[in-house]
Amino acid sequence: MKKETAIFAGGCFWCMVSPFDKQPGIISVVSGYTGGHVENPTYEQVCTGTTGHTEAVKITYDADVISYKQLVEIYWMVADPTDATGQFQDRGDSYRPVIYYADEQQKSIAEQSKKDLANSGEYDEPIVTQILPAKPFYDAEDYHQDFYKKNPERFELEESGGRGEFIKKHLK
């Protein structure tokens, strides 16, 4: 097994877990915070929009089963790449779409994938998702982990805010 990690921000981290968690080769998907300047932030702090952090998921995967490129392709199908100010009903800096890369190979794959998506004609608006170097990732509080499994009714409500329809349209 070749264990690697990927970090993606695409709005509410509750909604970012399920699409990746269900893929073959995924070892774990952890909700958390990254990209900001506050160490060990709490959910309440991140919600203020003053920490610089995004809600994100850290995906640990078996690269012999699923590639980083495949994960990036899934990311484009579950997060709106044309909305820089949030995702669906979640608005604000902590919900902005970002691909955080761990090394130059991930950076290259993400940038090429973004360019390919921009040239595909799938979107009328520009692709605004940022591609940034990974910073420390802080696990979110336990009640945020595996939210879609623990709170299916609330998760369904979150999905009904536009992301569910987006995923149905784009996830192949």
Image (tube, rainbow, N blue to C red):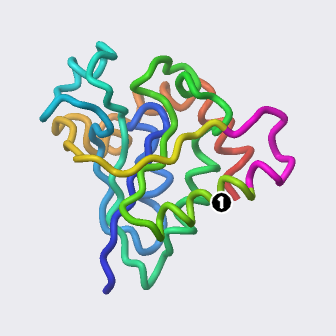
Segment colored magenta: 117-127
Q: Main secondary structure of the magenta part?
A: loop
Where does the image place residue 114, in percent across and percent down from the top left?
66, 53
The stretch drawn in magenta includes residue 149: no
Mark 1: which amino acid? Ser
Who is closer to the viewer here, 129 or 152? 129
Q: Quadrant of the C terminus?
A: bottom right
The extreme front residue here reads 104
What residue is shown with label 1? 113
Query: Which element type, helix, strand or loop, lies under badge 1?
Result: helix
Q: Quadrant of the N terminus?
A: bottom left
Identified at 49% across, 69% down, the residue is: 68
Q: In the image, is residue 51 above or below residue 151?
A: above
Q: In the image, is residue 108 above or below residue 140?
A: below
Residue 82 appears in which quarter of the rendering?
top right
Where does the image place residue 33, in percent across and percent down from the top left?
28, 37
Who is closer to the viewer here, 88 or 165? 88
Identified at 48% across, 66% down, the residue is: 23
The extreme top residue here reads 48
Where does the image place residue 69, in percent across and percent down from the top left?
56, 68
Identified at 20% across, 34% down, the residue is: 143
Answer left or right for 140 relative to 109. left
Crowd around label 1: few <14 · some 14–19 · many ≥20 (10 Å): some
Identified at 48% across, 27% down, the residue is: 158
The stretch drawn in magenta includes residue 123: yes
